[in-house]
């Protein structure tokens, strides 16, 4: 009978999950928040559809194991090294201060230091799943605040591991000395190090043998065995299942099998994660929330204010602009999914009693539910803060004139600067990243540190006298704000905007953009051009087609039914003959052969009408003329015959 109940509960959860995923995608909200709400509705404190949560909790634990395993797979040691400063400074200070400051505040209210540290640990973590999903959908992952947010989230995910290790020590009822505490901590980390060493030696070899079998089922089962085996080993040593899963993921992240492992595990992770988040909602006592609503609202507001303010201060100390600091702080103002995992683990060590757990659970869920709304309002709030923030005293009258302003010094910005420098065209770069500014100035780049959404920065960069402004940044809200300011100060300036998605084109045009370069369409045009080149269409025809497609802000590509009359009839060009050239390099198999030996006309129907050799052109060459290294053959014929001629010249027959 118990088995039937478990199956019924799983069926109900999956049945609820499907419409929630669809509905929340339609309203642009993360499905995680939907799972939490669903759990509240169908749980023992809602409509009582699921009353026994014990078996569900076991499956939810599996979801946590798979979640940590996949995070471990994504932790590339080389990428971590590149982000070391961002990780250590922003992430390190955020986690440390989020634990220390609340612990001292709780101590004032006579809350034991161990419980204070534990509550600080719970508050310190933010929701990787929700925040990254929203930033990705808004195309802000590569923006300055997106990169900092990602760095902090990554540090938080890594910090979960030592938190799990410390948890048993915080939960110990025995009062121990500092020396005893450090000894316990050393033993825990020593055990962890031993597991890592053994796993690093054994895991890759086992996976290699499994891959060598070329049996998919064996590889999948072997991967899950290694994952659960490592998790069970850490649990047997007094640590957490989740730590073992994370270790297994990190070890496999540097192997040759990462992508295959991810593809095998990802579907399982999604299923069990939905069960995990629904299970969190099941635990929320709605009656308790109704009875303690004022307290919960106060705690939710305090958490959001504390975290956003703390992160704002840290980012400002790191010399990032006000706008970046505000956006980063608001993005990370919620409590994360790993806090639920830690809280449940803390219950087993009697760190949280039932009433306190319910308060934490309700407050955390509401911070997550509010996150989409907060991130929606974040650009508006950031702009308000930027307006009242004091400007640096060194922003004075601009010294630039008739120049190009480059917003952002990423790959596109650097390439543009290099070309402008070679052409002798004056330019100035506006950049947010202090490290990029330092690096650029050391090589002689003309750079300004500042936020392009602030009018004073654009005025200092000479927006009133500039000829062109190029937005080479991955931050749509900042681009739109700065574009509006630029056009209001200089209507004649040519504004060139890079964007990733086509749905932003119309809005950018309304704001005054003169040229918009959407990456999606430019990729299409590159493919289009390469295909036509393969069919030997004349270059001027290809360029004309590209020009037509770029015209009127790519309107032809944005229409579902394009006007075919706008195009030159390519089929007629393909049916007609053409003349093309083929260069004979030193490695060509046919060098030294005569045209008679090549016999192109008989084999392909194409004709060599001229040979260009150095500064001399041999017109109407005879059958006795030879093909030499460095020659350029001028070949005429139909598209098909010229293709065959090129294939023959490339071959070794």
Image (cartoon, rainbow, N blue to C red):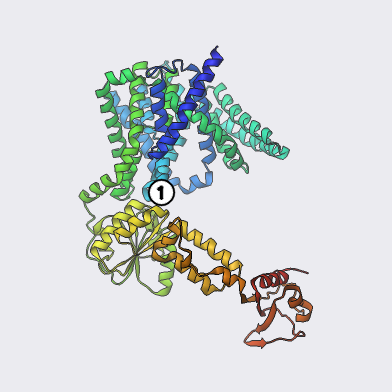
Q: Would you place residue 471 above or below residue 142 in this image? A: below
Nearer-the-camera pick, 499 or 28: 28
Residue 307 lies, in percent from the top left, at 32, 36
- Residue 54 appears in view: yes
Q: Quadrant of the N terminus?
A: top right
Q: Where's residue 85, x and y in %?
A: 42, 46
Q: Residue 377 falls in which quadrant of the image?
A: top left
How many neighbours does mark 1 have within 10 angstroms: few (below 14), some (14-19), or many (20 or more)?
some
Can you give x and y, in whole percent of width and height, for residue 449 in the image? 32, 57
- Total numbered labels placed on residues in the image: 1
Comparing 283 with 518, the one in front is 518
Q: Residue at x 28, y 20 (%)?
A: 290
The image quadrant that residue 300 belongs to is: top left
Identify the image quadrant of the C terminus.
Answer: bottom right
**Which sits in the foreground, 278 or 407?**
278
Q: Element under label 1?
A: loop
Report the residue at 31% width, 55% height from top.
480
Q: Residue furthest top?
A: 1
> Can see residue 170?
no
Quickly name the residue at label 1. Answer: 139
Q: Is residue 98 above or below residue 486?
A: above
In the rendered structure, the answer to whether residue 35 lies left or right of residue 384 reads right
| Residue that appears at 43% across and 65% down | 550
């Amino acid at each position: 009978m118990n088995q039937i109940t478990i199956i019924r509960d799983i069926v109900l959860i999956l049945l609820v999950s499907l419409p929630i995923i669809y509905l929340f995608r339609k309203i642009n909200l993360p499905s995680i928040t939907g799972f939490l709400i669903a759990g509240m509705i169908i749980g023992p404190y809602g409509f009582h559809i699921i009353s026994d949560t014990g078996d569900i909790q076991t499956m939810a634990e599996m979801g946590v194991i798979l979640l940590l395993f996949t995070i471990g797979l994504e932790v590339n040691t080389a990428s971590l090294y590149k982000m070391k400063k961002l990780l250590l400074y922003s992430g390190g200070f955020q986690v440390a201060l989020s634990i220390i400051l609340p612990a001292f505040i709780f101590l004032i209210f006579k809350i034991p230091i161990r419980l204070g540290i534990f509550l600080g640990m719970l508050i310190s973590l933010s929701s990787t799943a929700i925040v990254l999903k929203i930033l990705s959908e808004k195309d802000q992952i590569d923006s300055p605040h997106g990169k900092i947010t990602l760095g902090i989230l990554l540090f938080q995910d890594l910090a979960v591991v030592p938190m799990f290790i410390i948890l048993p020590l915080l939960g110990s009822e025995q009062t121990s000395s500092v020396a005893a505490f450090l000894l316990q901590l050393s033993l825990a980390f020593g055990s962890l190090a031993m597991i890592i060493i053994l796993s690093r030696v054994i895991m890759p070899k086992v996976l290699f043998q499994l891959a060598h079998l070329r049996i998919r089922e064996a590889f999948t089962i072997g991967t899950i065995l290694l994952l659960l085996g490592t998790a069970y080993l850490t649990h047997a040593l007094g640590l957490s299942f989740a730590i073992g899963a994370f270790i297994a993921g990190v070890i496999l992240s540097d192997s040759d099998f990462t992508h295959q492992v991810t593809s095998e595990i990802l579907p399982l992770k999604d299923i069990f994660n939905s069960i995990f988040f629904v299970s969190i909602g099941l635990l929320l006592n709605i009656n308790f929330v109704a009875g303690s609503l004022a307290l919960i609202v106060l705690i939710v507001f305090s958490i959001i204010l504390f975290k956003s303010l703390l992160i704002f201060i840290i980012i400002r100390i790191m010399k990032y602009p006000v706008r970046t600091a505000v956006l980063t702080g608001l993005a990370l103002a919620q409590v994360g999914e790993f806090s639920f995992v830690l809280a449940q683990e803390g219950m087993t060590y009697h760190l949280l009693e039932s009433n306190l757990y319910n308060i934490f659970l309700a407050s955390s869920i509401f911070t997550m539910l509010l996150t989409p709304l907060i991130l929606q309002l974040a650009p508006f709030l950031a702009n308000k803060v930027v307006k009242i923030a004091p400007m640096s005293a060194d922003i004075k009258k601009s010294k630039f004139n008739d120049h190009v302003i480059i917003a952002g010094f990423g790959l596109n910005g650097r390439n543009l600067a290099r070309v402008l420098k070679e052409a002798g065209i004056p330019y100035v770069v506006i950049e947010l990243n202090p490290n990029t500014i330092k690096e650029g100035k050391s090589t002689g780049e003309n750079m300004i540190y500042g936020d392009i959404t602030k009018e004073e920065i654009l005025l200092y960069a000479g927006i009133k006298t500039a000829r062109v402004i190029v937005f080479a940044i991955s931050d749509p809200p900042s681009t739109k704000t700065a574009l509006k300011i630029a056009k209001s100060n200089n209507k004649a300036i040519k504004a060139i905007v890079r964007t990733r998605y086509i749905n932003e084109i119309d809005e950018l045009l309304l704001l005054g953009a003169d040229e918009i370069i959407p990456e999606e369409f430019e990729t299409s045009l590159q493919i289009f051009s390469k295909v036509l080149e393969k069919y030997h269409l004349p270059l001027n025809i290809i360029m004309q087609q590209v020009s037509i497609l770029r015209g009127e802000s790519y309107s032809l590509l944005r229409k579902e039914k394009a006007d075919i009359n706008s195009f030159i009839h390519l089929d007629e060009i393909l049916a007609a003959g053409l003349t093309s050239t083929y260069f004979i390099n030193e490695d060509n198999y046919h060098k030294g052969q005569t045209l008679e030996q090549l016999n192109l006309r008989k084999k392909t129907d194409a004709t060599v009408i001229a040979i260009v050799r150095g500064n001399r052109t041999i017109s109407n060459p005879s059958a006795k003329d030879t093909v030499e290294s460095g020659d350029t053959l001028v070949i005429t014929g139909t598209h098909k015959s010229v293709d065959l001629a090129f294939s023959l010249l490339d071959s070794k027959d």
